[in-house]
Image: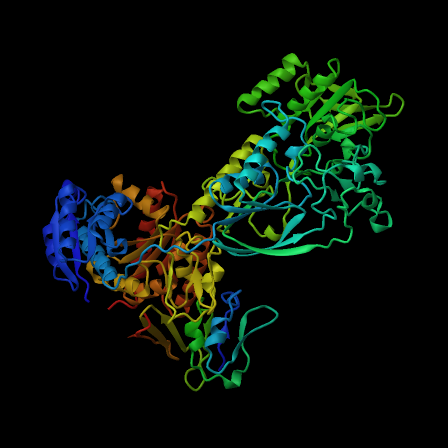
């Protein structure tokens, strides 16, 4: 059935109508092949204007519509709503920019503006004639998610998703849930015990009945894409069966003492460990590293439930999930690497995490503030902030929470030692928002002394048996030496490495921050979300918030209410070379069982980079098939520009197209010989279209995108540049001037500089003369 | 004469199941060099200059070396593939340039 195209031109209440002779244009358009109706109206966006189009569609006079009016960036919803109301597929609606990029920019050249408008309309008709209609695609999902990490972020995300009806598998590398938060003594701002919050969270999680927990389990492999991940899990043996009652008899007889950290003495910890104050799971676990094995077996003999089985083996599992939330958390920076502070070398030097262990009533000192190695009472404590942070030789970044953590710990010290001297060596105290209250309390109520200087050494005085911290006080200008029994290093956070996710992109800090600021939770690999300290250093409140954000993003993927159409593959043309699979920045394209590319609608972001790279032009987003683009390019009449060079420009929808619209809106004038095509990203521009343009006699082709580092899809501009460079080399060999094809970049507000660059390009073309292929 | 591969432009069709020139050569003469991952012609004598590889390469990295009987330096024969047309630029030994554009049905 031949298409029945309706061309509707808008006067825009005179803005367009005063420059262009719309009567003449619509009369000419009415004669083109495929055009059934061609009219002009005072304002197409008004109810009357919309009704004109609607009536034609309803009566079957037209089945495809060209709207020649304002920029497609404006009134997007107006015309989409119209299309939906009359049952017109949105891919049969083509917008033609006759305002911002025509009449507004070429007020002083009405004749050329007419020629440009005629060309633009003809391009729209040429593109719409072979167009196809598409409906959004949805795929079936099993509504299941994997959460990696059983700390507070992982548990929060799992609970939230489970409450929303999703089946969650939660894996945790250590034997028990709770992560670092379960080991804290108190957390701010309320100074309550973390076990309370964790218990409430755990109760809600268990109540959903939809969370399967695997402890002592790691992810060893991930394959697939959003909606269809296959994950390999390795479960280490616990050596304790589910009949364990948590009585602790094994702990009493175990001969191996285990120290909680490099500098703390062993307390009650042994080679078999119990869950401590947060019993999830309840079962004890044997620590393979320290346990002496079957040659000892004292725990096996004493266990009243016969729950210990030293013959257990590791287990491998494979699960299929729709999405993954990575909440693997953090590790403290290794303070032993800060040589001049003597961690691990000098007695009494501990980290802030060590102090949390000491402060707990079940810690090695029973919660009293005494020096761990010799039980000497602590009369003076010195905290060193930024230990190994904001330092080129250690961690270059700030971990953000160490200041507030130290201020919280000052509270601990005061609670058990009201007379102790407290000194804080700092560079800056970073306590945003109401955490300032912690700072005020530390100074005014707890009497802590703040010394603004980064200590260059912590030394041991063997005579007095105390530590000496030396620093330059930058506020008073004098050298300060503080003697203390205990020195606490506030070290920073480093992300826990999960080898299966090693290739996810990280920023310079090593954390998986995502694409800031637009999508912090989702990484480039669609379907994988990051929560908690795996994303960046953060305190507990922020971890919980980020976990909820990850759950919300994850849910949007799983609910799968697709609104976009993924690229279409023309299998009869495809030779299965795999370039689209290779170049997709999101890994959304993969090979199906026949070896042809298949795009996952849940993972596709619609950038079109696959279509830009396809050597055979057989994968395309709706509207960009090779027939539609050939129809568009061949509709251009390169000789209609009145001796001016004819330029075809592909502009990316994110920055370049709006920038040129902005130039028009501001009234900046430039030559009307530039014909523009809007593409989702310049990575979507196929070299074949540029070839078509040159072979049709178009004098020059511009590819204008976002600046290389600002491309919304990451690699669009750099791909466009490398493709154009390859083409230019070929053009040179063919004795066609390579300067005829150029890549430009612009920011969304750079209308003026873009217009200047375009003018330079046109001038260059004028010097080069007409295209050798021009008739 | 065997096709000449521009090693800067050739990317070995990285990570793809089969390089395009390797796939399309009717004589199975193109291969990827193990050392640098780029394409090369394995058997110069057997190449009959069909130029399928030249047209297939997405980066335009392959150029034909014309047999001297047809035209020695500076003669050239270079195709440019569009969506539904192909253009041949012919440069003869005197440097005269002619261009022929043909429509095809490859869209």
Residue most extreme to the front: A304
* Percent coordinates x, y for residue A115 in the rendering: 18, 55
Q: Is residue A356 left or right of residue A56?
A: right
| Residue name at image x 40 percent, y 48 percent | A706
- Relative vertical location of residue B59 with respect to residue A379 in this rendering, above or below: below
Identify the image quadrant of the N terminus of chain A.
bottom left
Quarter of the view holding residue A507: top right
Identify the image quadrant of the C terminus of chain A.
bottom left
* Percent coordinates x, y for residue A680 in the rendering: 36, 52
* Percent coordinates x, y for residue A303 in the rendering: 79, 42
Q: Is residue A691 left or right of residue A218?
A: left
Nearer to the camera, A629 or B59? A629
Q: Is residue A163 left or right of residue A305?
A: left
Q: Is residue A141 visible?
A: yes
Nearer to the camera, B68 or B12? B12
* Percent coordinates x, y for residue A697 in the rendering: 27, 65
Quarter of the view holding residue A329: top right
- Relative vertical location of residue A391 with respect to residue A94 in this rendering, above or below: above
């Amino acid at each position: 059935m031949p298409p029945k195209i309706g061309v509707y031109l808008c006067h825009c209440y005179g803005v367009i109508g005063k420059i262009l002779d719309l009567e003449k244009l619509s009369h000419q358009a009415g004669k083109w092949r495929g055009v059934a109706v061609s009219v002009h109206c005072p304002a197409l966006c008004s109810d009357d204007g919309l009704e004109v189009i609607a009536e034609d569609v309803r009566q079957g006079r037209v089945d495809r519509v060209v709207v020649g009016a304002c920029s497609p960036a404006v009134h997007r919803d107006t015309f989409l709503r119209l299309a939906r109301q009359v049952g017109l597929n949105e891919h049969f609606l083509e917008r033609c920019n006759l305002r911002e990029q025509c009449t507004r920019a070429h007020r002083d050249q009405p004749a050329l503006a007419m020629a440009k408008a005629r060309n633009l309309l003809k391009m729209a008709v040429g593109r719409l004639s072979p167009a196809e209609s598409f409906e959004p695609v949805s795929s079936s999902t099993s509504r299941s998610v994997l959460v990696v990490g059983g700390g507070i972020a992982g548990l929060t995300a799992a609970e939230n998703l489970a409450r929303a009806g999703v089946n969650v598998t939660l894996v945790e590398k250590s034997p028990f849930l709770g992560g670092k938060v379960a080991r804290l003594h108190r957390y701010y701002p309320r100074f309550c015990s973390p076990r309370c919050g964790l218990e409430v969270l755990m109760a809600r999680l268990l109540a959903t009945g939809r969370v399967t927990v695997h402890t002592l389990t790691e992810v060893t492999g991930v394959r697939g894409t959003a909606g269809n991940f296959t994950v390999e899990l390795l479960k280490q043996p616990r050596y304790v069966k589910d009949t364990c009652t948590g009585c602790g008899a094994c702990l009493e007889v175990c001969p191996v003492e285990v120290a909680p950290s490099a500098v703390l003495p062993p307390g009650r910890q042994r080679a078999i460990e119990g869950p401590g104050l947060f019993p999830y799971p309840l079962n004890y676990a044997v620590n393979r590293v320290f346990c002496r094995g079957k040659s000892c077996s004292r725990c096996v003999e004493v266990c009243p439930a016969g729950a210990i089985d030293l013959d257990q083996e590791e287990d491998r599992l494979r699960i299929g999930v729709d999405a993954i939330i990575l909440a693997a958390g953090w590790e403290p920076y290794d303070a032993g690497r800060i040589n001049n502070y003597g961690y691990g070398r000098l007695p009494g030097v501990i980290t802030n995490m060590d102090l949390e262990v000491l402060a707990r009533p079940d810690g090695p000192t029973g919660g009293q503030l005494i020096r761990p190695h010799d039980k000497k009472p602590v009369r003076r404590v010195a905290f060193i902030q930024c230990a190994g942070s904001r330092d080129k030789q250690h961690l270059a970044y700030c971990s953000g929470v160490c200041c507030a953590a130290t201020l919280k710990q000052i509270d601990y010290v005061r609670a058990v030692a009201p007379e102790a001297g407290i000194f804080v060596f700092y560079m800056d105290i970073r306590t945003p928002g109401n955490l300032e209250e912690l700072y005020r309390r530390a100074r005014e109520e707890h009497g802590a002394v703040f010394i603004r200087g980064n200590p260059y050494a912590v030394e041991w005085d063997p005579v007095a048996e105390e530590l000496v911290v030396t620093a330059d006080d930058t506020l008073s200008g004098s050298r300060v030496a503080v003697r203390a029994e205990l020195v606490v290093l506030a070290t920073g956070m480093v992300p826990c490495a999960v080898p299966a996710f090693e290739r996810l992109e990280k920023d310079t800090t090593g954390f998986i921050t995502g694409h800031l600021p637009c999508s912090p939770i989702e990484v480039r690999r669609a379907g994988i979300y990051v929560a908690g300290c795996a994303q960046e250093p953060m305190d507990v409140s922020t971890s919980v918030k980020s976990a909820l954000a990850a759950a919300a993003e994850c849910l949007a993927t799983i609910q799968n209410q697709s609104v976009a159409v993924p690229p279409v593959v023309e299998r009869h043309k495809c030779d299965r070379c795999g370039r689209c699979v290779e170049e997709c920045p999101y890994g959304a394209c993969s090979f199906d069982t026949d070896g042809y590319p298949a795009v996952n609608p849940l993972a596709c972001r619609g950038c079109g980079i696959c279509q830009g790279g396809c050597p055979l032009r057989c994968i395309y987003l709706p509207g960009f098939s090779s027939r539609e683009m050939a129809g568009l390019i061949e509709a251009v009449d390169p000789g209609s520009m009145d001796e001016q060079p004819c330029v075809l420009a592909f502009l990316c929808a994110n920055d370049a197209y709006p920038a040129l619209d902005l130039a028009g809106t501001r009234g900046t004038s430039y030559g009307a010989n530039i014909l523009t095509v809007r593409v989702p990203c310049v990575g979507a521009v196929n070299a074949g279209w540029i070839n078509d343009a040159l072979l049709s006699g178009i004098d020059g082709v511009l590819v204008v995108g976002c600046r290389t580092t600002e491309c919304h899809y990451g690699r669009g501009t750099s791909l466009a540049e490398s493709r154009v460079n390859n083409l230019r080399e070929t053009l040179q060999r063919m004795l066609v001037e390579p300067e005829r094809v150029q890549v430009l970049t612009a920011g969304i507000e750079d209308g003026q500089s873009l217009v200047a660059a375009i003018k330079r390009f046109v001038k260059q073309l004028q010097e080069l003369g007409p295209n050798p292929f021009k008739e | 004469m065997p096709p000449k591969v521009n090693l800067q432009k050739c990317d070995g069709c990285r990570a793809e199941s089969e390089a395009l020139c390797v796939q399309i050569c009717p004589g199975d003469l193109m291969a990827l060099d193990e050392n640098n991952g780029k394409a090369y012609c394995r058997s110069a004598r057997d190449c009959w200059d069909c130029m399928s590889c030249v047209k297939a390469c997405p980066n335009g990295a392959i150029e034909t070396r014309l047999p001297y009987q047809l035209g020695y330096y500076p003669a050239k024969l270079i195709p440019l593939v569009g969506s539904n047309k192909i253009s041949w630029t012919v440069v003869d030994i005197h440097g005269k340039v002619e261009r022929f554009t043909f429509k095809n049905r490859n869209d």
